[in-house]
Image (cartoon, helix red, strand yellow):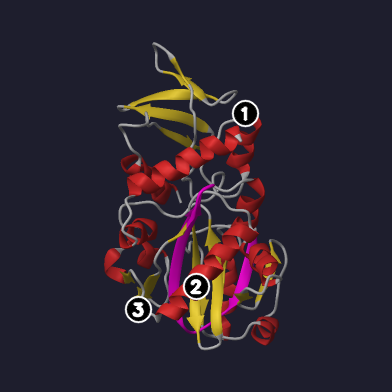
Amino acid sequence: EWTVSMQSAQGVYSFIDSARYNRFIAVIRNGAWEVDVDGKKFPIDKNDFSFHDGSRKISFDCAYITIHGTPGENGLLQGYFDMIGIPYTCCGVLAAALTFNKFTCNHYLKAYGIKTAESLLLRKGQQISNTDVIEKIGLPCFVKPNAGGSSLGATKVTQENEIQPAFATAFAEGDEVIAEQFIAGTEVTCGCYQTAERQVVFPITEVISKNDFFDYEAKYNASKAEEITPARIPDELANRIQQITQAIYNILNCRGIIRIDYILAESGIFLLEVNTTPGMTATSFIPQQVKAAGLSMKTVMTDVIEESIHLKCR
């Protein structure tokens, strides 16, 4: 998810109040930790996450983590920042690790009464017969990596002969794969964040994919999906989704901005997944919802950054 992460980084950079903060983009890739300053790259000292621009040492007061996938979404980077004492803007280690593992997160929240699709988990080296998948999950179903995002490696399976190839595709992206029951309905997504003073739940976005499902192409090609904010659903239903979003935020002890995806089915509201580092390009869901709420991204960014810094001091 390198390309998506860099797009989000540029979005976050543009949203942050440049009159209030000095902004730098730090890039972690293939073992290299660098800060880009006007096209010049400077190595990061991992002992304290600082860098030297040739004339002075520059340290960070806060890190806005917007890496999609590992190590920014699964708790690894959060643990590092905890160890060296730098505040960061997203969920802590436990919440990040839990939400990154779709199977574990959904089953955890199921204990709190959150509706989720039936699913099964396979780890690399394990196998399952087509018959067992059909009996336990049914067709159609989704097969996808258990940890990861952007629908990479995900397949909508409609016929029995597609099951094993779908598992192979998903295993190419990760060591754990889930098969998940297909639930017909309307896909929506809702973002929120919280500070010591208030919790803000954004208007809901309705997602209409022109592909068979909201896959990678539909997520990042504007011509392949329609995103409507606020969603065309009754106010009572919208309020209920916002209540569930707020409840999940608190159950998981989240921090910063999160976004939760749902399917609205005849039998109720089903959780799809919890995103603790949601996309932050100019056209991503969160900026759309912030605008629909009558807020500005600059204000929201300042709220989140200041809360992270003050949380460290409390």
Residue 142 shows in the view: no
State the image quarter where residue 272 is shown: bottom right
Magenta span has 111? no
Looking at this view, is 37 or 168 the one in front?
37
Residue 232: assigned label: 3
Residue under circle 1? 84
109 vs 43, nearest the viewer:
109
Q: What residue range appears in magenta?
A: 176-199
Compared to residue 111, the image places residue 80 above or below, namely: above
Residue to which mark 2 is pinned? 241
196 w.r.t. 177: above or below? above
Residue 52 to residue 61: above or below: above
Structural distance between the alpha carbons of marks 3 and 2 = 13 Å
In the image, what residue occupies the spot 48% across and 64% down? Answer: 151
Q: Which of the two labelled residues, at mark 2 and mark 1, occupies the earlier sequence position? A: 1
Tell me the distance, in whole angstroms, between the alpha carbons under discs 3 and 1.
46 Å
In space, the residues marked 2 and 1 are separated at their CA atoms by 37 Å
Query: What kind of residue is marked 3?
Result: Arg
Residue 236 location (% of width, % of height) = 45, 80
The local crowd at label 2, few if under 14, some if 14 to 19, many if 20 or more residues have their Cα within 10 Å, is many
